[in-house]
Amino acid sequence: MANKKRAFITGASGQDGSYLAEFLLDKGYEVAGLVRRNAVLDLGNIHEFKNEVKIYYGDLHSPESIAMALLDFKPEEIYNLASLSSPLGSFSDKLGTIMVTGVGAMHVFERAKQIVPKAKIYQASTSEMFGAPKQVPQNEDTPFNPANPYAAAKEFAHRMAVIARNDQTQPQFISCGILFNHESPRRGVNFVTRKISVAVACIKNKRKEGIPLNEIGEPIVQNGKLKLGDLSAKRDWGYAPDYVAMMWMMLQADKPDDFVVATGEVHTVEEFAREAFAVVGLDFKDFVETDPRFVPPVQTGPLCGDASKAKRVLGWEPKTKFKDLVKIMVHADLARFS
Ligand code: NAP
């Protein structure tokens, strides 16, 4: 039997890491993941298929842990997905965000250059790097203008990736996916779409206990209400499994490049909430309240991606429509929080 291709994923227990691991296992890859050692050791989203993924405990803070995993596993493909990924949360942990999301990515590139110089690398860049852009929709040529520490850290990582790619002495294959928001039932509960789908489920199922906590440590539903920030914020929301396929496609290309990955459709937070409550026959106006504590100090958006290059060069297109995404998330949480 031919040797299996080996892929190494940092942030394997996160939303994208878990879908990507499943996607690559389906393609016959041997998959390894760098996972932070935490108190419960439940491996997050990869808990259910943990026996199929080789786990390396490590941290992007520790170049040594990255190096040890690369030395042992010798991957041909590396997907750097690990990050402190909350834009709002990054305001209260600026240094941690810069060190993990920015400097941590550089550690991955540098250790790969020394240990597996031929490995192709995917870097998880983000539409947040555009900040509050004047140009709508945004494409690969839209200037970056980060509006939060998370986006600034991602821009640093993105620029280090491009520098490593263009290094004439030892160029690395590093492609950056400038991904617009993508959601799923595995999205962290500190993100607005997931807060909404969890709240719909808890309200509909009249759940009183075991309600997940939001990003400021309060139950997502309190006294029958869901608190959100700016309902008029506009985002381009896709479905995470569609997007991990594009990460893989980028590494199958002959040369590294940057690609915007998006649906090109924009919806407000209010529209998401209205659709989600409507899935269970409720009116969002009866349950949603706004709260300034969930409004970031510097606003981002409107974010709307032009993914025509991804379609033209790699043949990628999103498959899942906005209303289907909302239904998938609400139905999953109705079952989970029954
Ligand atoms: P996620 O669910 O938050 O996953 C991030 C992963 O990084 C988690 O598994 C987390 O581990 C891990 N991590 C955090 N700090 C780490 C550290 N110091 N060392 C090692 N691992 C660490 O994020 P996602 O939605 O899957 O996104 C994947 C990547 O794409 C991220 O880099 C994100 O910033 C980027 N991105 C996401 C979107 C989106 O809409 N989802 C859009 C654009 C870009 P724990 O489980 O231990 O916390």
Image (spheres, rainbow, N blue to C red):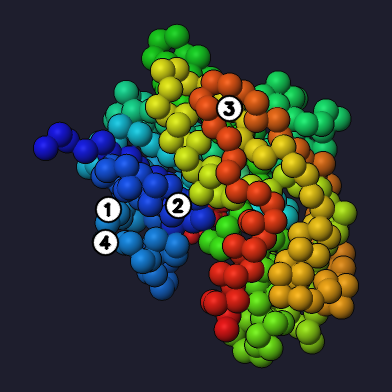
Q: Which mark is residue 51?
A: 4
Residue 243: give x, y in percent of width and height: 54, 42
Residue of label 3:
310
- Label 3–label 4 contact, CB within 8 A: no
Q: CA distance from mark 3 to mark 1?
A: 31 Å
Question: What residue type is disc 2 on?
Answer: Tyr
Question: What residue type is disc 1 on?
Answer: Lys
Residue of label 2:
19
Q: Earlier in the sequence, mark 3 or mark 4?
A: 4
Q: Residues within 10 Å of mark 3 (few under 14, many from 20)?
A: many
Q: Indicate left or right for 236 with 250 as reference.
A: right
Residue 101: give x, y in percent of width and height: 56, 44
Residue of label 1:
54
Q: Nearer the viewer, residue 244 or 173?
A: 244
Question: What residue type is disc 4 on?
Answer: Asn
Image quadrant occupied by the C terminus: bottom right
Vertical position of residue 224 compared to residue 32: above or below: below
Question: What residue type is disc 3 on?
Answer: Ala
Task: Assign a secondary structure to mark 1.
Answer: strand
Q: CA distance from mark 1 to mark 4?
A: 7 Å
Task: Assign a secondary structure to mark 3.
Answer: helix
Mark closer to the observer (1, 4): 4
Q: CA distance from mark 3 to mark 4?
A: 33 Å
**Res. 316 visible in picture:** yes
